Amino acid sequence: MERKKKILVGGIYHESHSFSNVPTDLESFKKVLFLPGRDSIEQLRGSMSEMNGFILGSEKFDLELIPTLWAWTVSSGPVMKNALDHMLAVVRESIENSEELDGVLFALHGAMVAENSLDGDGYILSKLREFVGEGIPIAVTIDLHANISPLMVEKADIIVGYDTYPHIDQIERGQEAAELLVRTINGEIDPVMAIVKPPMVIVPNMQLTDAEPMKGMIELAHQIEKDPAVLSVTASCGFSYADVPEIGPTGLVLTNGKAELAERYAKQVSDRFWVSRESFIPKMLSVAEAVEASIRSRVHPVILADTGDNIGAGTPGDSTFILQELLIQKAEGAVVIIADAESAKTAIEAADSGESVKLRIGGKTDEYHGEPVELVCHVESVTDGIFRNVGPMRDGIIENMGATAVVSSGGIKIVLTEIKMPPWNLEQLRSVGIDPTKEKIIALKSAVAFRAAYEPIAGSIIEVNSPGLSAADLSQFQFNNIEHPIFPLDEMDIDADQT
C-alpha cells in the first residue's frame, strides 16, 4: 500500500502598516490567534480559513498533514524580530520532528513588514526553503492586498491569491493550493510563475471586487485561467501603507512549464491595472458631509465607513472624528465602535454603581486620529468581548475584543473595546446586545471588509473621507523605500508604457 504524502501545513499571517507606532510583538499574535501543532487543524476545521481549505484538500487527496503553527493578528506596525524568529522556530521544530516531507502548504498575507526584513513574507519563504531544502515543493496562499515580491516567487513553487474583497474565498484558495501542490508532487504539472508590477498604488477602499474597476480585473484573471496551459492567475491590489520596494498591484500568473506565456499574461494583467489607474482614485464625502447625509437619510441603517481609521489596514481603531461630528450635528440612534482599553476599564468599574461616568474616549494612540472626546456617559452593558463569527467572512472563527462596555451619551451608543477588532461580522454588535438592523447610523472603522456582513442589512453605505493612518491621501506619509515615479504620488508621463 502506497504511503500517504506528508504535507507540512501552517500559516504566519500579518498585514503590516509601516507608519503605525504600535509594533507587533509575539503577544499580539497570542492574544488573537496563535495555534501551535494539532490545535491549528482541530480549531480551524470547518472555519472560513485557508487552513480549512488545506484540510479539505488533504481529505480529497488522502494526504497526511504535519501541522506547525497558525498565527495571525490584526494589522498594526511591523512585526518585531523576536516574534518572527519565535514563530519560525516553532515551524522549524515541527520539520525537524518529521521523518520525511513531500510538500508544504502555507498561508501568508503578502504584506508583512518585519524587523528581519522589509519583505517579511519573502523572508518567511526563504526560511521555509532553507528548512525543507530545494527538492520539496512549496505552495502558499496570499491575501488580495499582497505586495508580491520577486523573492516570494523565487522561493515558492506555487502562489495562489484571493479573488475577493471582502475576503470570502479563503477555503477555495486553500483547496486550489492543495490541488496544485499534489499535481506537482505527482509530476503532472511543472509550475512556472511570472510577476509584472505597474508603478502605482491603490488604497484599500478602491479594491472592492464586486465593483469596478476591480470587478473587471478579476474577470480578466478568470478569462486568462481558461487557457489550458494556465494553472492560476492572481490580480493582487497591494497594500498602500507598507513602505517597501514591492508596494502596489501585481499580475501573477502560474503556468504549466511555459515561462514566456506566464510573463505575457502577467503583463496583460499589469497593463490593465495601469490603464485603469484613474478609476482607482476614490471620490468620497467629508466627515461633516457624510454625517449630514446619514441624518437626512430615510433608509436605515446608514453605514458610515470610516476609511481613515480602517482597523484591517493597521490603524488603532480609536479615531474620534466621526464621533465628534455625530455629537456636533446631534445625531440620534447612532452606534460607534472605538478601541480604548482605558475607557472600557473605567466604564466597567462604574457599571455596578449605576452612576454616570465621565470618560475621555479615543484619540490616545497617535496624532493621526483626533483628540479624546470628553463625555458623561451611562453604562448600558458589560461583556467579555468574545464572539463567534457567523456568515460569509471568517465563519466559525472566535474573536476576542477583550473587556467591552457599551456606553451612551447624547443619543449615541459607543462600544468601547479593550482590543481593536475589524467590524467584519454582525455578531460583534449582537454579542454586546445591539441589533444592527434596528439602528439608524452605524460608524464602522473599515474600508471594504465590513460589506460582507453589513451590505445585506444596510439602508445605504457612505464611504467617509476621514483622516487617519489609512486615509486615501497618501501624500501625508513619508515613504523612504518605494521606487519613484509612482502613481498617484508623482507626476508621470501617462502616455508611456509603464510596465
Image: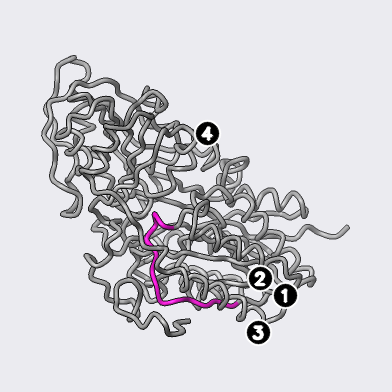
Q: In terms of image quadrants, where is residue 257?
A: bottom right
Instruction: Verify whether residue 200 appears in magenta.
Output: yes
Which of the numbered marks, if any, corresponds to residue 256?
1
Of callouts 1 and 4, the N-terminal one = 1
* Separation of marks 1 and 4 at Cα, in angstroms: 38 Å
What SS does tag 3 mark?
Answer: helix
What SS does tag 1 mark?
Answer: strand
* Residue lying at 54% horizontally and 36% vertically, measured from the top left: 391
* Image position of 350 with respect to 226: above or below: above
Which of the numbered marks, if any, corresponds to residue 472?
none
* Separation of marks 3 and 4 at Cα, in angstroms: 44 Å
What SS does tag 2 mark?
Answer: loop
Mark 2, mark 1: which one is toward the viewer?
1
* Separation of marks 3 and 1 at Cα, in angstroms: 11 Å
Label 4 CA crowd tier, 10 Å (few <14, some 14–19, many 20+):
some
Q: Nearer the viewer, residue 125 or 248?
A: 248
Mark 3, mark 2: which one is toward the viewer?
3
Q: Which residue is mark 4?
A: 390
Q: Where residue 309 sits in the image (x, y, percent)?
A: 29, 49
* Image position of 54 with respect to 47: above or below: below
Label 1 CA crowd tier, 10 Å (few <14, some 14–19, many 20+):
some
* Residue lying at 30% horizontally and 59% vertically, measured from the top left: 472
Q: Which residues are magenta?
A: 194-206
Q: Where residue 135 sits in the image (x, y, percent)?
A: 67, 76
Q: Which residue is mark 3?
A: 260
User: In the image, is 431 to the left or to the right of 44?
Assistant: left
Amino acid, disc 4: Val
Q: Nearer the viewer, residue 11 or 74?
A: 74
Q: In terms of image quadrants, where is residue 368?
A: bottom left
User: Quadrant where the N terminus lies?
Assistant: bottom right
Of callouts 2 and 4, the N-terminal one = 2
